[in-house]
Image (cartoon, grey):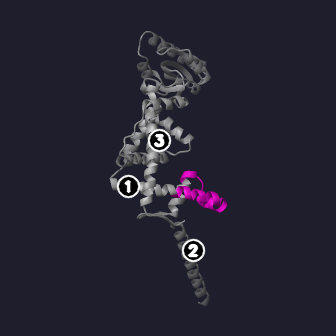
Amino acid sequence: MKKLGLIFLSLIIATCLFLINFSAKAEIYNKIVAIVNGDIITLYELNKRIKEMTGKDPLWLKKYHKKEYEQLCKKVLNILINNKLAESKAKELGIKVSEADINEEIKRIEKAQGITHEQFLKMLKQHGFTYQEYKEQIKKNIQRMQIMEFEVRSRIVISDKKIKEYYEKHKDEFRTVGKVRIASIFLKINNPDDPNEVQEIMRKAEVIMSRIQAGQDFSDLAEEFSEGPGADNGGDLGYFTLDELDAKLRKIVENMEVGEVKGPIPRPFGIQIIKLLDKKKAGIKPLKEVKNYIYKILYNKEIEKRYSVWLNELKKKAYIKIMF
């Protein structure tokens, strides 16, 4: 009995120590690091944002690179304070940014850059952004502009001269690569080592080719016969840069005119007939195509400048206490 009593007492002590330790860690983790008017910023929020911005574990940074951690804390805490002030003001002004607003702005950016949504996502990845992070940034940008519309009375004027100057200095931003749009009829060969099957598929391709030359619609024949990608869409494979095509196909397409059809073309696992639907030469987009995009860039820069001044004025009137 005495032994059981000692074991029971040990369990109670261990549990108490665990709860005290857990409570201490929770208190440190949820420590308030700043008060902004009636809102608080916790250490958890601060560390979470550091992780999002740097991709580094803040606890690891604090342990092994204390100076870098402290510098990041100051920088990120300032961002969080600014966000709290802006969010509070947006709420006061009744400003709400919807998911539809964010998606519309992203579509506008894609259109201005002349890229697909998939290309846009690839570009974000190359710059180290997740799609969600970028959407959050877009939300803040829209919110910032709407606040400025309420707070800044003087109209922002972006002259044609400024737009042209930006265009001349940043022409590389508007450089385009050569692209071709291809439609394809692909006839699959199940066994490339079987000469009879290869010959049979080649004959079928030659018949299709003769029907095209006789005036039958390529897309109709693609929907009827093609066993490759794009068959349900008249064989349309979309746009490619020449570098995205394999060497054999690139050599053929380079010398084709829009509307021209080539084939039959032996491929590793089938026979292909292609039609060149469109060809875009490499070059620099003319000013008229990118004028609205440049206007938006310059407008946002001016908003950013005025927003910074407005935010500093807001800080002077706010109650901000940093406890870090």
Write the residue at 37% across / 53% down: 90
Q: Residue at x 37, y 41 (%)?
A: 155
Q: CA distance from mark 1 to mark 3?
A: 21 Å
Q: Residue furthest top?
A: 214
Q: Residues within 10 Å of mark 2 (few under 14, many from 20)?
A: few
The magenta segment is: 52-77
Residue at the spot of label 3: 301
Residue assigned mark 2: 21
Q: Residue at x 40, y 37 (%)?
A: 157
171, above or below 321, in the image: above
What crowding class fits label 1: few (fewer than 14 Cα within 10 Å), some (14-19), or many (20 or more)?
A: some
Give above or below for 26 relative to 60: below
Q: Earlier in the sequence, mark 1 or mark 3?
A: 1
Q: Amino acid at mark 3?
A: Lys
Q: Which label is found at residue 10?
A: none
Instruction: Say which amino acid is labelled 2.
Output: Asn
Under tag 2, what secondary structure?
helix
Residue 76 magenta-highlighted: yes
Kindly identify which residue carries mark 1: 89
Residue at disc 1, secondary structure: helix
Q: Position of residue 217 (x, y in %)?
A: 41, 16
Q: Label 2 to label 3, Cα distance in Å?
A: 49 Å
What is the x, y in percent for residue 294?
A: 46, 33
